[in-house]
Amino acid sequence: MHTVTLQTHYHHVFRRRALILIALAVALVLTLMLDLSAGPASLSISDILSGLLNPENLELRHRIILFEVRLPDALIALAVGAALGLSGIETQTVLNNPLASPFTLGISSFAAFGASIAIIFAPSLPWLGHTAMLPLFALLFALLCGGLVLTFSQMLGGNRENIVLIGIALFFLGEALTSAMQYVGNAEAVQEIVFWSIGNLTKAGWTEVIVVTLCFFLILPFSMRHVWVMTLLRAGEAQAQSLGLNIRRIRFFVILRVSILCAFAICFVGVIAFVGLVGPHIARLLLGEDHRLLVSGAALCGALLLSLASFLSKALMPGVIIPVGILTAIIGVPVFVLLIAGKRRRP
Amino acid sequence: MNRLRVKNLNVFYGKTQRLFDVQLPDLEDGDILGLLGPNAAGKSTLMRALSGVQKHQGQIIYKDNHQGDIPLSDWHREVAYMPQTPPQESSLLPFELLWSAARALNLTTSDQKLAKKIELLFKRLGLAESAMSPMYSLSGGKRQLVGLALALIRNPYMLLLDEPTSALDLHWRMIVLDLVHERVNRQDGIAIAALHDLELAARYCNKLVLLAHGKVVASGPVSDVLTADNIAAVFKVKAKVEPGELGYPIIQVLEPML
Ligand SMILES: Nc1ncnc2c1ncn2[C@@H]1O[C@H](COP(=O)(O)OP(=O)(O)OP(=O)(O)O)[C@@H](O)[C@H]1O
Ligand SMILES: [Mg+2]
């Protein structure tokens, strides 16, 4: 009757999911190429490939476009998308809430508040350029928000309902404070704040790419160390706790690293909506609940979504770059709905 | 040998006290203690306190050591606790759940041995067909059985089972308690189970504790605890208790008392 052992059976399941993960990685490379090829200057994909392999193959103008404009923009899309996907999956699992994302912890609205302070008061530090102030303020306020969530939740006993509530409360506080800044700011400043709040990738350079990428790869090993507990948590907190695991402590560390990662992800590019929420869900639908695959899968899905959005932001209307934050939801929602519908049909 | 002794156990939720000076019969190898009592009596609270999840005051003495003196990791290696809530309905697979639990707990078994162990456990609990179906697609009873498998994965010495059979049919109820009985006898362990089914308790437990409003009303051997008077006082039902053919008392509930 049972000729196949459970282990071999699971091995098959795991291998199928690993193949999906590889397919996602391949898709990511393809969208990256698409993204690099899109833009006003006509550079074909083969030009880009040969240029990447040997920059001497390109004429100087195209070399500058590729290496100083397109590559940083395309890579920051990957880095930010991956960071948001990773922080999204960890937040959802650890709070046991499919609607949770780093943004529902208030991180994004505090970042926007920090950014608006920088825009309106234009503070300056002697040893930092003016352009560095905006991301710096966004980063500091996002981190402040993470700190507040952790402090309050520790004070209230650290259960997950409280963390969700505190996060939502801080989210609205950040929104209100940003609105207050807009109220006192002049029209130009308000426009800049709104523009930042939509999120766009075009201002990023190599420094930004390196910072976000570094942050992602520094946080990832910690996430990988927790994959077993995170998988176990999908059976519910009571079950994980009954085995003697200190879920409160684990949750503290997860929220801590998620806040840091998310703060770095959005401080340069603004509030990119939806990726941190839907990237993880797409990954879950495709890969199941085993966090060994799911953690990297969510990062891949986030990167894929944002890269696709970045491509479309340049390709949809020739000559115009639509802010990418507008597109993430517009392309994310249909993909998401299709996947859910597909899953339904399969029993 | 005395394995578990519980005395003067008090539990507070905030300022409200929910367990009052609870004392359990001393437990020895091979004992199965049944915990009986109406809803909100404090059975789950007592279970959580014994498992170490819930803060408490009083004495839990395990193999001559106070629980507070035993490092938590050692404690949880000896004691497995099955909470009243079964694993939630996610798309997690039962096999994944047991596997990740074993790995999260750093159980030092090879992949092969672990898989074998999970397979045997699942087969024993009638879960072989469900091992690769997402939790949300399992029936309530099957999910409860997965929860039991999770508690058993570590071969614990002491089993704490909070209503392990509440969702199970007649067949699986007995299979589960047979399995508990077998484990307790084969490995010289002990088990404590909160139960609502008096017949099952009479059949499988050798000691009982009757709990009401956080206090022990009666405790000791089955025949001392399961009397018509005790049942009337605690469960507010009129009942007849008769010696049964299989060697344990049969309880016939007649009507609720108003
Ligand atoms: N986390 C909690 N906070 C506050 N009060 C609680 C908590 N858990 C349980 N209680 C209270 O403690 C008392 C005992 O509850 P407990 O869950 O231990 O009952 P029980 O005997 O397991 O009941 P049931 O048969 O319904 O499972 C109840 O009055 C309950 O309301
Ligand atoms: Mg209970």
Image (tube, rainbow, N blue to C red):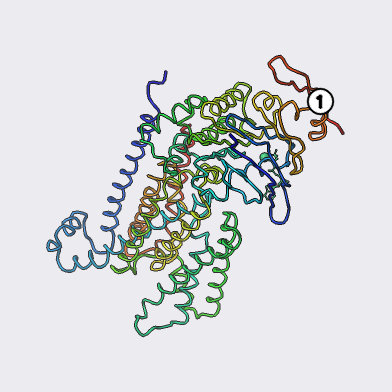
Query: Could you say whether the residue bearing mark 1 is in a helix, strand or loop?
Result: strand
Q: Which chain contains the residue that carries disc 1? A: B
Q: Which residue is mark 1?
A: B239
In the picture, residue B208 is in which quadrant?
top right
Q: What residue sits 32% from the left and 39% below the top?
A: A19
Left or right, B140 with respect to A49, comes to right
Taking the spot 79% from the left edge, 30% from the top edge, the residue there is: B231
Badge 1: how crowded within 10 Å, few (<14), some, or many (20+)?
A: many
Quick check: A315 left or right of A162? left
Residue sticking out furthest to the right: B258
Q: List x then y, in percent, for residue A280.
A: 44, 49
Location of residue A313 with respect to B143 vertically, above or below: below
Report ligand 2 position as a quadrant. Answer: top right
Rendered position, A146 above or below B133? below
Q: Percent x, y for residue B39?
A: 73, 39
Q: Quadrant of the N terminus of chain A?
A: top left
B119 vs A271: above or below: above
Give the image location of residue A301, x and y in percent.
Answer: 38, 50
Front-lying residue, B49 or A339? B49
